[in-house]
Image (cartoon, rainbow, N blue to C red):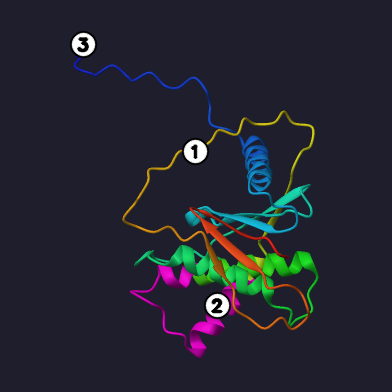
Amino acid sequence: PPAGGREPMPERDAKPPPCRAELARMEGEVLVKSAERLGMTRGVLAVRCGARGSIVLDCRDKSRYWRVPAVQVPVVDPLGAGNAFASAFAVGLADRSENLNREELVLQGACRASATAAAFVAADGMPVASAQLREWLRDEAHYLRARVEAVPISADAAPLPFLPIEYEPEPEVPIVEEAYVQRQPVWGAPEPVFHGRGGGSYLDSL
């Protein structure tokens, strides 16, 4: 240490963190580029962001995406929360009981998914499907829906490089690439196919 007894301050990174506008541009471009790499042209892509909620892109309208907040609950056991989010989102997108337009169907599905994931995070094990829990999920989803933020995606910004990500192989743990949502095709549309990989989810039959 120098004579004064203090350790020298570590050098700080000269590059400041991205501002909100730059972060929005990056998020939007990554969503669009990811949808292109997945071959999505009409489905819905969602990326879970933990306590920050999720970001959602409808591939039929790539001029904007949505930020969906998370329900703030104490973390007891996060096991299964990602699968719960993806399953609830897929079921919500396949639900035509309320005759909603496409945008509202996507947004309400994302909010229900966020609330469902929160129920798993706050529970010790599998949450008990009770009338009280269903009412809580409905109220939380309604609360989140009022706080969804639409973020425009600029078509003029310079594209970001999309670098391939290499994953470590896990030969002893089989990776499930696709899961099918079982339901009755009440309106004549094809059965939706739900895909889940890592922190993202998408439904590509909508």
**Is residue 41 inside the magenta stretch?**
no
**Nearer-N-terminus badge (1/3):** 3
For the view shown, which residue lies furthest in the bottom direction? 131
Type of the residue with mark 2: Leu
Viewport quadrant of the C terminus: bottom right
Q: Is residue 66 above or below residue 107?
A: above
Q: Tell me where residue 116 appears, x and y as whole percent.
A: 52, 72
Task: Examine the image and state in which quarter residue 45 appears.
Answer: bottom right
Q: Residues within 10 Å of mark 1 (few under 14, many from 20)?
A: few
**Nearer-N-terminus badge (3/2):** 3
Q: Are marks 2 and 1 in contact (CB under 8 Å)?
A: no
Viewport quadrant of the N terminus: top left
Secondary structure, mark 1, is loop
Q: Nearer the viewer, mark 2 or mark 1?
A: 1
Q: Is residue 127 left or right of residue 57?
A: left
Type of the residue with mark 1: Ile
Task: Examine the image and state in which quarter residue 178 appears.
Answer: bottom right
Alpha-carbon span between mark 2 and mark 1: 35 Å
Q: Tell me where residue 55 appears, x and y as whole percent.
A: 61, 53
Q: Tell me where residue 81 appears, x and y as whole percent.
A: 45, 66
Task: Examine the image and state in which quarter residue 203 appears.
Answer: bottom right
Say which residue label 2 marks: 137
Say which residue label 1 marks: 165
Name the residue: 51% across, 59% down. Answer: 177
**Is residue 127 inside the magenta stretch?**
yes
Q: Nearer the viewer, mark 3 or mark 2?
A: 2
Say which residue label 3 marks: 2
Which secondary structure class fits the magenta region best?
Answer: helix
Alpha-carbon span between mark 3 and mark 2: 58 Å
Q: Tell me where residue 20 appears, x and y as whole percent.
A: 63, 39
Q: Which span of residues is magenta-colored?
A: 117-142
**Nearer-N-terminus badge (2/1):** 2
